[in-house]
């Protein structure tokens, strides 16, 4: 290990502006400015997100440096999210990072957001060093934009062995929540409502997708039609059954996810298993994976809640391993909304 590598990391792919300071893989600070403005619109408005990133980025970086107790001249490299994400949002972080690298004459490191979600499992914290996955590591990445099964053979090699063919799991939570009149983002609200509901009260059609791929658009449609039919008989159906609806929907999404994760583990023979991304904060999913892990003797890694949603610590940890291999990014780079 090269001692004393300190990295300032920026994450601005969607609606959270985050900055973190990582030293030798240890997280010294990880600050997130969330953008409440989107709540009023029932989803993220890209134009508003870019503007909010522009307003937030300097204060968030200042706070991240202060909390880490680091001065600008102690930073050895600056990392940023290259994509995937909203282009206008990515441009704010990319431009900031380029400027910071140029002024301070330090390397620039662009990071894939999806790889970073998985790499959150390798974030070190003083006193918590023991629980880090071994390779090969199989991770279910479930967020608002992605649902993937990823095999990591080392810190920087990522193979996608399963993917959604339409909506992401987080999108299914958010869109079904919207249908029930709940605010954005609906995932955490459904999680809370589900804790007081009967997960077997209602049954929704599950997709039959071959192999390790996922599909969630059919579930969304089946949920919508189910509510429409019940609404015809009872105008207060949603209000009167909110907890049971949330619990049943959540159970269905979890069953789809767990089914494919178990299959992926069987097919690859990998038993170092993790979950990552915003939906990995879901209480029901965490419980279900734990149950499966006990049954199948998996060595399970559940991310700490602060590393489930978008954060710059995961960008910084990934960048640390890139720094060790001198994988730096040229200043001509442009962010990418999509990375396959
Ligand atoms: O990883 P993330 O912060 O952003 C993306 O890269 O997409 O994930 C956001 C997604 C949203 O769809 C949100 O509803 C979902 O994660 N989410 C949850 C929970 N917390 C966040 N879904 C279900 N249960 C939760 N507790
Ligand atoms: Zn994300």
Image: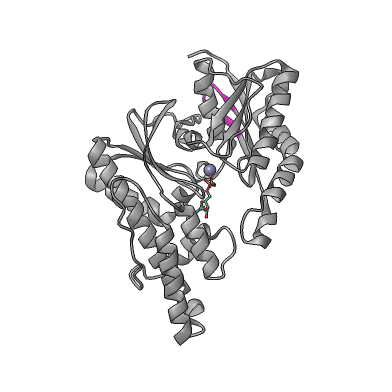
Residues 125 and 22: in front is 22
Magenta stretch: give its range: 22-29
Residue 188 in sight: yes
Residue 63 at x, y percent in the picture? 71, 35
The number of numbered discs placed on residues in the rendered structure image is: 0
Most extreme residue toward the top is 2
Residue 100 at x, y percent in the picture? 72, 24
Residue 128 at x, y percent in the picture? 45, 32
Residue 263 at x, y percent in the picture? 26, 45
Most extreme residue toward the bottom is 233
The relative height of residue 104 versus residue 337 in the rendered view (above or below) is above
The residue depicted at 31 percent of the width and 48 percent of the height is 260
In the rendered view, does 181 fall on the left or right side of 103?
Answer: left
Residues 65 and 336: in front is 336
**Is residue 27 a member of the stretch shown in magenta?**
yes
In the rendered view, does 213 fall on the left or right side of 101?
Answer: left
The residue depicted at 70 percent of the width and 55 percent of the height is 37
**Is residue 44 a member of the stretch shown in magenta?**
no
Residue 293 in sight: no
* Image quarter of residue 96: top right
The residue depicted at 51 percent of the width and 41 percent of the height is 307
Residues 301 and 147: in front is 147
The relative height of residue 245 versus residue 325 in the rendered view (above or below) is below
Q: How is the image coloured?
A: one colour
Q: Main secondary structure of the magenta part?
A: strand
The relative height of residue 18 versus residue 42 in the rendered view (above or below) is above
Residues 152 and 21: in front is 152
């Amino acid at each position: 290990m090269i001692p004393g590598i300190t990295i300032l990391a920026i994450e601005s792919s969607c609606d959270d502006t985050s900055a973190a300071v990582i030293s030798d893989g240890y997280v010294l600070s990880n600050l997130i400015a969330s953008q409440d403005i989107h709540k009023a619109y029932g989803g993220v408005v890209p134009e508003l997100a870019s503007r909010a990133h522009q307003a937030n980025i300097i204060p968030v970086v200042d706070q991240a440096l202060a909390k880490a107790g680091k001065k600008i001249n102690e930073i050895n490299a600056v990392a940023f999210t290259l994509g995937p994400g909203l282009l206008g949002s990515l441009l704010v972080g990319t431009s900031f990072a380029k400027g910071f690298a140029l002024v301070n004459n330090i390397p620039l490191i662009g990071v894939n957001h999806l790889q970073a979600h998985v790499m959150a499992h390798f974030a070190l914290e003083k006193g918590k060093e023991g629980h880090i996955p071994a390779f090969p590591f199989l991770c279910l990445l479930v967020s608002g934009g992605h649902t993937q099964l990823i095999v990591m053979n080392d810190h920087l090699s990522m193979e996608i062995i399963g993917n959604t063919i339409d909506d992401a799991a987080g999108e299914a939570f958010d869109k079904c929540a919207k249908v029930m009149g709940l605010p954005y983002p609906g995932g955490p609200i459904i999680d809370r409502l589900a804790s007081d509901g009967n997960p077997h009260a209602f049954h929704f059609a599950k997709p039959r997708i071959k192999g390790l791929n996922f599909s969630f658009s059919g579930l969304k449609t089946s949920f919508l039609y189910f509510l429409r039919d019940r609404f015809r008989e009872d105008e207060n159906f949603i209000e009167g059954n909110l907890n049971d609806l949330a619990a049943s929907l959540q159970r269905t999404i979890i069953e789809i996810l767990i089914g494919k994760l178990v299959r992926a583990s069987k097919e690859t023979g990998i038993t170092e298993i993790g979950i990552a991304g915003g939906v990995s904060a879901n209480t029901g999913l965490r419980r279900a994976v734990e149950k499966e892990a006990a049954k199948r003797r998996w060595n399970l890694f559940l991310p700490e809640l602060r590393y489930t949603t978008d954060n710059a610590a995961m960008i910084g940890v990934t960048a640390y391993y890139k720094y060790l291999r001198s994988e730096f990014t040229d200043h001509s780079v442009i962010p990418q909304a999509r990375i396959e």
